[in-house]
Image: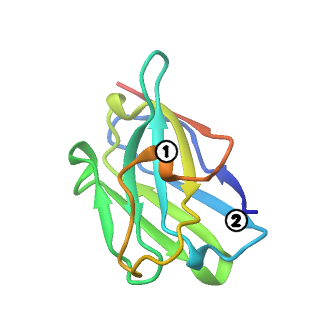
Amino acid sequence: QVQLVESGGGLVQAGDSLRLSCAASGRTISNYPMGWFRQTPGKDREIVALISRRLGSTYYRDSVKGRFTISRDNAKNTLVLQMNSLKPEDTAVYYCAADKVLFESDSYYSKRINDYDYWGQGIQVTVSS
């Protein structure tokens, strides 16, 4: 089992930056593909960014490319999302998640949200205009 806890959210103005962290316990996160997701009321949860297990392969949704960066701090067993140039449309509850997939390459990540097995409780990010 992996327990995930997000931190770093809050209320900011458009153009500001935030750094979300996802602290993991129970297992080392270097064993899992992981991702950041977000959800707004009445909408489906969507992928924000994904990162593979070890080789650092990444994926970003188009609307955050060039503004957000996903990374791991394996020494701290933490997943990070650096968010720059924030926009009001980035307002959402942000979740981190891990995929306990086995027998895939170290560059693998899934773009299917249902493949992710462990989820944090979510953290609110609000960007005012």
Q: Position of residue 31 (x, y in %)?
A: 58, 78
- Please identify the quarter of the rendering in which residue 22 is found: bottom right
Q: Name the residue nearer the viewer: 21 or 85.
A: 21
Q: Position of residue 111 (x, y in %)?
A: 35, 52
Q: Secondary structure at mark 1?
A: helix
Is 25 placed above or below 6 here? below
Left or right, 125 with reference to 2 = left
Query: Which residue is label 1 attached to?
Result: 114
Which residue type does callout 2 highlight? Answer: Ala
- Please identify the quarter of the rendering in which residue 73 is found: bottom right
Q: Secondary structure at mark 2?
A: strand
The C terminus: image quadrant: top left
Q: Position of residue 26 (x, y in %)?
A: 79, 69
Q: At 43% across and 30% down in the image, what residue appears?
A: 91
Q: At 65% across and 51% down in the image, what residue appears?
A: 6
Left or right, 16 with reference to 65 = right
How much space separates mark 2 and mark 1, taking CA atoms? 20 Å
Which residue type does callout 1 highlight? Answer: Asn
The N terminus: image quadrant: bottom right
Please say whether residue 126 is visible from this viewpoint: no
Q: At 20% across and 47% down in the image, what residue appears?
A: 62
Query: Which residue is label 2 attached to?
Result: 24
Left or right, 78 with reference to 90 = right
Q: Name the residue nearer the viewer: 129 or 26.
A: 26
Q: Name the residue nearer the viewer: 12 or 47.
A: 47
Please say whether residue 117 is visible from this viewpoint: yes
